[in-house]
């Protein structure tokens, strides 16, 4: 608390002309507000994703934003230092959730649930060094789809890949490839290359850097930092440059070294079956079996996935490379870590990198490539004359009661120009214009804001007249981001 | 960290038959997971509320779950002790948000926004003593609608009340009354009763308890704890038993004591105008001007509201009293507290007590009064015969690609009975039944799960045949809570 007071004091001093009770106004480091445009983009993206999740029968769950610290302990390896802890205020020791996978495992174990197909969209927290320009924050959304249950090999695993393709197709964010690999094959590969058992994990997390660093650097790290023998590293280097389809699987099954490793064969057979199912699901051409894929997380036990955009995205006049846009895999042992009898519930899932999608769309919005409408208002009730607030209110109530999205000025006597400007600025397509002489004749005017045409309609038919015009509007115009 | 270790140790000791690495599995005190049924109820309720917010042109924003602690300091009076603080891990001193109003004010001031009509639905955090059976948690949703901007008196204020009526009507949760009062009238009343200026606030928060305690108790607290003179308390007692409509406003304007108070007259004129607008908006019969309404929050400056359910709600065979279901008011000075030049942005808003709504619906679900469908699946792809997984996969992919919500078993050779049972248990209306002899004839069967009737259709027309059947389904059946 002392620190807090000092910081407040410091903040006061640094904001020069502020009165003494003021401080620098900001959101916490690595976080941001979402303004209406950003929320529209976000809700639109999430709605498309949820539609796909539901198409596959997923149910929705949510968990608290914080967990008992013990729940998170020992699940994230060296990344545990990035966990946000709550202050001990007497009571339980709590931390903010770091992802949605560990809370799912805790949920399944706690409620003794053996099968669940669920999605979970929520914010998670990591005290990482934020790179906010590239869409990396300390508070960010995760968007997860997981299938828990004891099922036949690779059947739910293949459906996860199908889900990712449907989502990326729906978001229409560019061409992509779904890389797949298998944890058992990685283990078998390290074994076959002569890496000692206890170095599998750390070698694996080094291989994981291949998407960002060239092989030479990865090799150096392997040898100098992880203590892998140079010959072993070179053998690994031979394998991790391989990628392909079913023919590569068949070739590797004949590979002199790999064919002797039970783990490698198990992994290869898994990949083979997965590729077969992907063929049946019609997504074979989007899948790439890639031996360099080695997601770092400790808890994966089987297939691992990563979706990567293969082409840069055009933002304004610039091309931007996005890279990874979704990832996941199978983790059969995580739930058991929470069960007192170590009962396992096998799980497989994917996480959609929605923050990257948000960033791309926000950048495109800023570049003027797309436009966004942040409210759904169809009708504005206006008047050119004074003392029409009462009548405007009556009409607004009538339209609201009829379910029509309606706004009016909160001023008693607004100027006509300001009212029409509000409509134009906010993309409100229709205005009801009230005037004394028309009302005496039982008439109101409906103005089309775009065409500026006005039509007189009987006051008593107003709701019907508006509804029929709203139906004719291009409904795409009122939905989230769209081509300008 | 020491404490954390000790607690972990304690937890281990207390879970008897667990191996040493295990601990008691639970969510943090006062929090809960939302399971798929609860999420369906929640999403359904929120969707109805959002529809109303959007009908009134509200935009959506979101803010980080934590704020710099200084942002929250001094906004909640004695309740500040309930704020969750984050541990100082080097860097900024942070606290979890306590409501959505202060973050809104910070957002407006920080971005120098003068007008905004926004809704915000998010979780907030209070280290209160949870009464979870009555729907009170330490982590809970707030659902706020606010109008910021310098406008004419009571115009946005009246719209907030209209919004509440539309929401409560849409939720169809029982009869209600919207109580209104005015902070200036309360001040004027205390002044007229002889309460010293510096005791207005504390006297006000005592009056606030009238909804739960009888007058005698409130009177005692006023005199003994707040130091109000007995005669003053008795005069207050006369006023706070008054409630009514426009005629009460007129009567009080003539009241000997109140008419001498500038504040009281200002409040009464405000209420009179508000009631007039409510009349125009067609909600007069739902409004009750009630002098006992005295919401505790420090930041209100004008009108205050509270929506109360007037009848107990039937849950199973029992009646349950719910009470307050929404509340709000005008707070014209909060944004200025964040602005270095003290620039004010007047605001008025309401918060819907969605947790109470969730609790009622969850209780009705538990009592069997309503049922809930947690997934949207329309079609299940099944087979009675072995080795049909490949064909099932092909058909699932075809249906998913056609946008049809589809599931299948993740087992290679599931039993027919289990497949049909899954459909019945999950309310899946249609099954596609594959058989070898039918497929050879280019035929598949569509089974209506409810009627158990099966029809043969050409395999190539499957998508069309399913779509036309899905269109005929009662769509209400697939949407959230519904009468059983």
Image (cartoon, coloured by chain):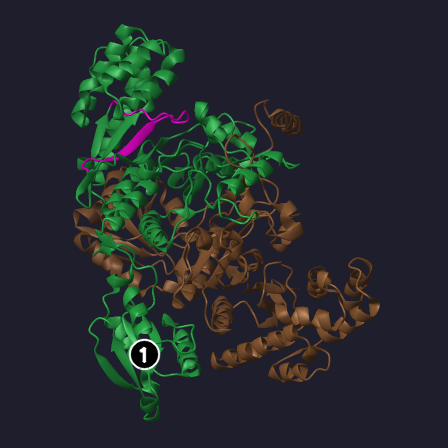
Chain colours: A green, B brown
Which residue: 27% across, 29% down?
Answer: A180
Q: Secondary structure at mark 1?
A: strand
Between A458 and A380, which is closer to the camera in this rendering? A380
Residue B465 location, quadrant: bottom left
Quadrant that contains the C terminus of chain A? bottom left
Relative to A111, B247 lies left or right: right
Residue A162: percent from the left, percent from the top? 27, 41
Residue B290: percent from the left, percent from the top? 65, 74
Residue B25: percent from the left, percent from the top? 58, 34
Quadrant that contains the N terminus of chain A? top right
Q: Is residue A297 magenta?
A: yes
Which residue: 27% across, 67% down?
Answer: A424
- Parent chain of label 1: A
User: Which residue is identified by label 1?
Assistant: A432
Which residue: 43% across, 52% down?
Answer: B374
Q: Is residue A141 magenta?
A: no
Residue B175 location, quadrant: bottom right
Residue B311 visible in the shown view: no
Residue B198 location, quadrant: bottom right
Between A52 and A171, which is closer to the camera in this rendering? A171
Between B240 and A417, which is closer to the camera in this rendering? A417
Residue B205: percent from the left, percent from the top? 69, 61
Residue A445 vertical position relative to residue B140 in the rendered view, above or below: below
Residue B83 vertical position relative to residue A261 in the rendered view, above or below: below
Residue B51 visible in the shown view: yes
Range of magenta residues: A291-312
Residue B363 vertical position relative to residue B247 in the rendered view, above or below: above
Relative to B123, A40 lies left or right: left
Is the stretch drawn in magenta largely helix, strand or loop?
A: loop
Relative to B80, A56 lies left or right: left
């Amino acid at each position: 608390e002392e620190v807090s007071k000092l910081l407040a004091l410091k903040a006061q001093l640094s904001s020069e002309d502020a009165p003494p009770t003021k401080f620098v106004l900001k959101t916490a480091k690595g976080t941001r507000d979402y303004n209406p445009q950003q929320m529209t983009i976000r809700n639109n993206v999430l709605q498309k994703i949820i539609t796909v999740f539901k198409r596959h029968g997923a149910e929705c769950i949510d968990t608290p934003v914080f967990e008992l610290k013990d729940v998170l302990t020992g699940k994230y390896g060296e990344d545990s230092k990035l966990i946000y802890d709550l202050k001990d205020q007497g009571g339980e020791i709590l931390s903010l959730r770091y992802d949605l996978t560990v809370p799912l495992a805790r949920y399944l174990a706690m409620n003794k649930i053996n099968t669940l197909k669920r999605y979970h969209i929520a914010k998670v927290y990591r005290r990482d060094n934020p790179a906010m320009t590239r869409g990396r924050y300390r508070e960010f959304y995760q968007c997860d789809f997981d299938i828990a249950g004891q099922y036949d090999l690779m059947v739910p695993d293949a459906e996860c890949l199908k889900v990712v393709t449907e989502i990326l197709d729906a978001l229409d964010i560019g061409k992509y490839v779904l890389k797949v690999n298998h944890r058992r094959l990685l283990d078998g590969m390290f074994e076959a290359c002569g890496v000692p058992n206890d170095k599998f994990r750390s070698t694996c997390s080094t291989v994981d850097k291949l998407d960002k660093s060239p092989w030479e650097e990865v090799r150096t790290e392997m040898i100098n930092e992880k203590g892998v023998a140079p010959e072993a590293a070179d053998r690994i280097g031979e394998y991790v440059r391989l990628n392909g389809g079913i023919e590569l699987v068949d070739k590797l099954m004949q590979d002199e070294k790999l064919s002797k490793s039970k783990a490698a064969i198990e992994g290869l057979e898994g990949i083979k079956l997965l590729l077969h199912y992907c063929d049946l699901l019609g997504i074979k051409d989007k899948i790439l079996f890639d031996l360099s894929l080695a997601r770092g997380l400790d808890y994966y036990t089987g297939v691992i996935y990563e979706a990567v955009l293969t082409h840069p995205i055009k933002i304004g006049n610039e091309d931007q490379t996005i890279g990874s846009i979704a990832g996941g895999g199978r983790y059969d042992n995580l739930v058991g870590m929470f069960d007192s009898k170590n009962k396992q519930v096998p799980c497989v899932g994917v996480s959609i990198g929605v923050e990257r999608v948000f960033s791309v769309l926000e950048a495109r919005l800023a570049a003027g490539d797309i436009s966004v409408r942040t409210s759904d208002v169809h009708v504005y009730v206006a008047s050119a004359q004074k003392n029409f607030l009462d009548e405007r209110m009556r009409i607004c109530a009538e339209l609201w009661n009829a379910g029509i999205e309606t706004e009016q000025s909160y001023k008693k006597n607004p100027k006509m120009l300001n009212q029409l400007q509000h409509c134009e600025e906010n993309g409100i397509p229709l205005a009801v214009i009230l005037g004394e002489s028309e009302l005496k004749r039982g008439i109101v005017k409906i103005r089309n804001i775009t065409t500026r045409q006005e039509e007189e309609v009987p006051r008593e038919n107003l709701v019907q007249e508006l509804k029929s015009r709203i139906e004719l509007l291009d409904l795409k115009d009122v939905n989230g981001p769209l081509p300008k």
